[in-house]
Image (cartoon, rainbow, N blue to C red):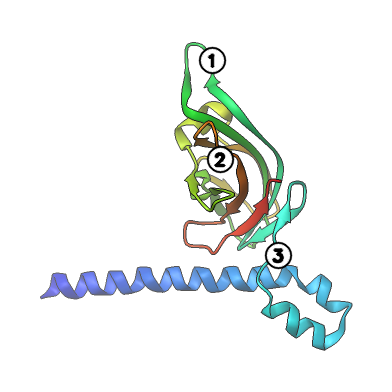
Amino acid sequence: MRKTTTLALLATGLIALGCGSGAADTASDSSGDNKASSSSGDEGGAKAEEKPAKTAKIGQPARDGKFEFTVKSSKCGVAKIGSDMLGQKAQGQFCLVTVNVKNIGKEAQMFDGSSQKAYAADGTEYSADSGAAIYANKNAETFLNDINPGNQVTGVVVFDIPKNVKLAKLELHDSMFSGGVDVTLG
């Protein structure tokens, strides 16, 4: 009986944390729209909050939760990452996405490259390859990296996708529980 109660309380707590994280992400995303709404008056501000987060492009900052992401570049068609001695060969092709991650929050936040997703034009979802990212990043910038408030890191998130596929967009997350923000790659 006690084990069941303890498990129920633990599960409820984890669900509450996940819900709370999503609520914080929504609040942070809408704060990015305040620049646009401040010039259009009170009426425009209400409309801006109802809109879903807009999609960013390469070179444009995009916010999710405590992170501001700026995708610097995307390079696909890479067959192998690393050196001849230490490296990893792609199952299909590697897509190397260079991204700058800035902590815009008030406390340290962990950046985890494996929480990032990529999508093909047909909606097929691809997960990040954390093993390959170790070889693509000299200082493990995208593997469980704590970023303090105001600090930023630039690293490479790696996706192993089929050779005939082209990525259309990324979905970047400040944590595995966040809603994410889209960045188009076209």
Residue receiving disc 3: 54
Task: Please report whichever mark, 3 or 1, sits nearer to the chain's N-terminal start.
Answer: 3
Mark 1 and mark 3 in contact (Cβ < 8 Å)? no
Residue receiving disc 1: 83
Determine the secondary structure under disc 2. loop
Q: In the image, is 149 to the left or to the right of 6?
A: right
Q: In the image, is 40 to the left or to the right of 178?
A: right
Disc sitting over residue 142 in the figure: 2
Q: Is residue 108 in view? A: yes
Residue 10, quarter of the rendered image: bottom left
Please state which of the two labelled residues, at mark 1 or mark 2, is closer to the viewer. Answer: 1
In three-dimensional space, the C-alpha distance between marks 3 and 1, rounded to whole angstroms, equals 39 Å
**Mark 3: few/some/many CA within 10 Å (<14, 14-19, 20+):** some
Determine the secondary structure under disc 1. loop
Q: Position of residue 104 (x, y in %)?
A: 68, 59
User: Label 1 amino acid?
Assistant: Ser
**Does 131 sit above or below residue 119?**
above
Mark 2 and mark 1 in contact (Cβ < 8 Å)? no
Q: Position of residue 148 (x, y in %)?
A: 62, 51
Mark 2 and mark 3 in contact (Cβ < 8 Å)? no
**Mark 1: few/some/many CA within 10 Å (<14, 14-19, 20+):** few
Residue 7, quarter of the rendered image: bottom left
User: Label 2 amino acid?
Assistant: Thr
